[in-house]
Amino acid sequence: GASRWVENRYTPVRDEVGRLVEIDGTVIDITERKAAEEKIALLARTDALTGLANRATFVERLHQAFAATRRGAAPFAVLYLDLDHFKDINDTRGHPVGDLLLKEVGERLKSRIRESDLVARLGGDEFAILQSDIGDPSDAGALAAGVIETLSAPYLIDNAELHVTASVGISPCGPETSSPDAMLSQADLALYRAKEECRHQYRFHSVELDK
């Protein structure tokens, strides 16, 4: 009852005047090879630790979403976030505990987004969310507030209760947005403004930040 992938190779056999007499061929089972190829393709698009999308996948989707808005699709927003004082946890608890914390953060982020959204781990303790189909920039603010609340709940890891907060920078896509790469940079800039001011909060990108 299982499906198998096969590769067919056929060779025509002709008589002395060129008429087709028969076809000889082989059927090779390549199921294991296909499975390995699919696994490699998946690994190239996902973060090995959390199973979330990786930076390359996020940037690809970001470019697609940006192009779609230029053709009339609904606006979207980029949320760039990282954990406050994550280095302290790594230093005091060790990297294995830090990795477990990052995996739990990834699970909590997935629980906050819709199926049409995308969450990715960009590296270290940095994550990003592509929030699709927003009616108003305040929708992105509401998601950021929910993410901050969700991530601030206690974590039980390695028989210890850990506490961590997050800061978020937001860049909505608007008529003045020059490129998808600029959106990511603007969200990153807004993130660092949030961290400078107090942490455990979100900030929108603004022209004042650029100045």
Image: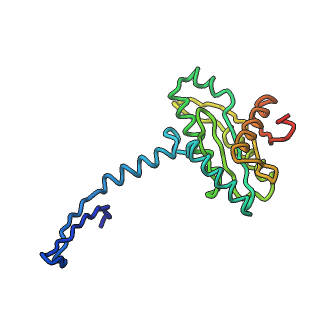
Tell me the quarter of the image containing the C terminus.
top right
Above or below: residue 75 compared with residue 90: below
**Image quadrant of residue 18?**
bottom left
Image location of residue 185, percent across then percent down: 72, 39
Front in this rendered view, residue 129 or 12: 12
**Residue placed farthest to the front in the image?**
17
Q: Residue at x 38, y 50 (%)?
A: 37
Above or below: residue 150 compared with residue 125: below
Q: How many marks?
A: 0
Image location of residue 58, percent across then percent down: 60, 47
Q: Residue at x 23, y 63 (%)?
A: 27
**Image quadrant of residue 4?**
bottom left
Image location of residue 40, percent across then percent down: 42, 46
Image location of residue 5, percent across then percent down: 32, 61
**Image quadrant of residue 106?**
top right
How is the protein colored in the picture? rainbow
Q: Does 109 sit left or right of 202 as displayed?
A: left
Tell me the quarter of the image containing the N terminus.
bottom left
